Image (cartoon, rainbow, N blue to C red):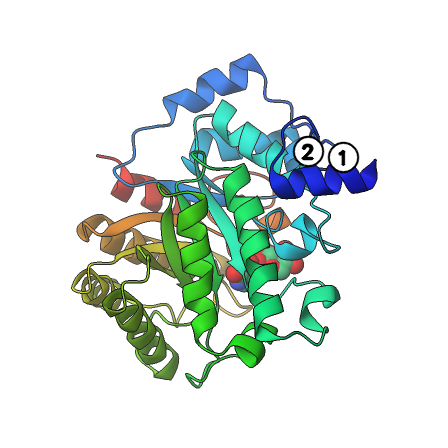
Amino acid sequence: MRHMCALAAFLLVPGCGDGGGGSVRIGVSDELAGRSAERDGYTKPLGAALRVEPARDDRGYLDQFATTFTSMTPENEMKWETVQPRRGEFEFGSADALVAAARRTGKRVRGHTLVWDQQLPEWVSEADWTPRELAAVMRAHVRALVGRYRGRVAEWDVVNEPFDADGSWTESVWYRVLGERYVEIAFRAARAADPDARLFLNEVGAEGPGPRARALRALARDLRRGGVPIDGVGLQNHTAIGSHPSRARLLRNFRSYARLGLDTAITEMDVVIPPGPAPRDGLEQQARAYADAARACRQARSCTGLTVWGVNDRYSWKGPGQRPLPIDVKGAPKPALAALRRILEP
Ligand code: XIL
């Protein structure tokens, strides 16, 4: 049966429930769905990465998400190791639960991520593939995942973090076996699986100038010129006070992609406050970093939204001590949240 369900999920045959992953339910009350609907008035989507466990178990977390943000990115639940831990066995339970909760609270969904070298199971990264086999594995994964949420995901991070900091290609299994054309294969498969989803190339540490930013822009340009179906470039913008990219820098970056006919998005922003500055001052500097990004996004017509990487400091992947998010460990709004709201409200 398990085999049959795995095969059914693979072929997208309905009736196998969550695709063999066990179902997860995030309870959204009518009252919360109602209050959430009031939060719709930003000029650009303001998103957060959401995790299934606290969304299910921590009422405050779900409440903060639903009443503050207008877009949702699953933080880990659509990654390869979660969705296809063994070859041909798909587990969509957690992703389904997040997408259902987002729809019930009226949020846009960003899908994250299809092809990446991390959170990739060893059956993919460690095997001895021929190019033809690995391309088939990639296409089947993309078809199953993108196809399952067809019509429900506005934007997909199709390829994540293709470059190292020095601008060279990351030596992933994808690059080793398929070469640069792995990117094109991924985008074409995603377009075929959902022609209406907007397809993004997502990268870390490419907000400012430097070799990785140059490599990313050159790749985006070549993909566009080559007719590969790419719609946008995601800048993660994981940053810290004292070193965050300025509004002008981000705007220049957005516009350089707009000239290629590409949208942009801030996809994973957080702003670490390292130990040092007086606590109040740290929060103000952090608010300025968020404000700069929000202003740049609001100013550039091609910027499709700003997503922060977590709902509150308590669940940040950086650890609560880094205080990187606009809501604190106790669930209270920080100056950063006030700044984001002020800038993104009409
Ligand atoms: C992170 C998650 O936040 C963590 O929970 C997980 O353990 C590792 O991945 N760039 C990305 C995201 O594209 O997927 C990463 O998310 C953070 C860096």
**Residue 93, position in %: x, y?**
68, 37
Asked if the residue at tag 1 contacts the one at tag 2, i.e. Cβ–Cβ closer than 8 Å, the answer is yes
Disc 1 is placed on an element classified as loop
Q: Nearer the viewer, residue 89 or 91?
A: 89
**Residue 343, position in %: x, y?**
26, 44
Q: Which residue is mark 1?
A: 22
Number of numbered markers:
2
Residue 110 lies, with reference to residue 231, above or below; the image says above
Pointer 1: residues within 10 angstroms few (<14), some, or many (20+)?
few
Quadrant location, the C terminus: top left
Pointer 2: residues within 10 angstroms few (<14), some, or many (20+)?
many
Tell me, yes or no, if residue 287 can be seen here: no
Q: Is residue 339 left or right of residue 169?
A: left
Spatial CA span between label 2 and label 1: 6 Å
**Residue 75, position in %: x, y?**
57, 49
Rendered residue at 45%/24% (across/down): 36
Disc 2 within 8 angstroms of ligand 1 (CB): no
Disc 1 within 8 angstroms of ligand 1 (CB): no
Quadrant location, the N terminus: top right
**Residue 26, position in %: x, y?**
65, 28
Residue 272 lies, with reference to residue 66, above or below; the image says below
Disc 2 is placed on an element classified as loop
Rendered residue at 36%/84% (across/down): 211
Q: Which residue is mark 2?
A: 18
Residue at the extreme right: 1
Q: Amino acid at mark 1?
A: Gly
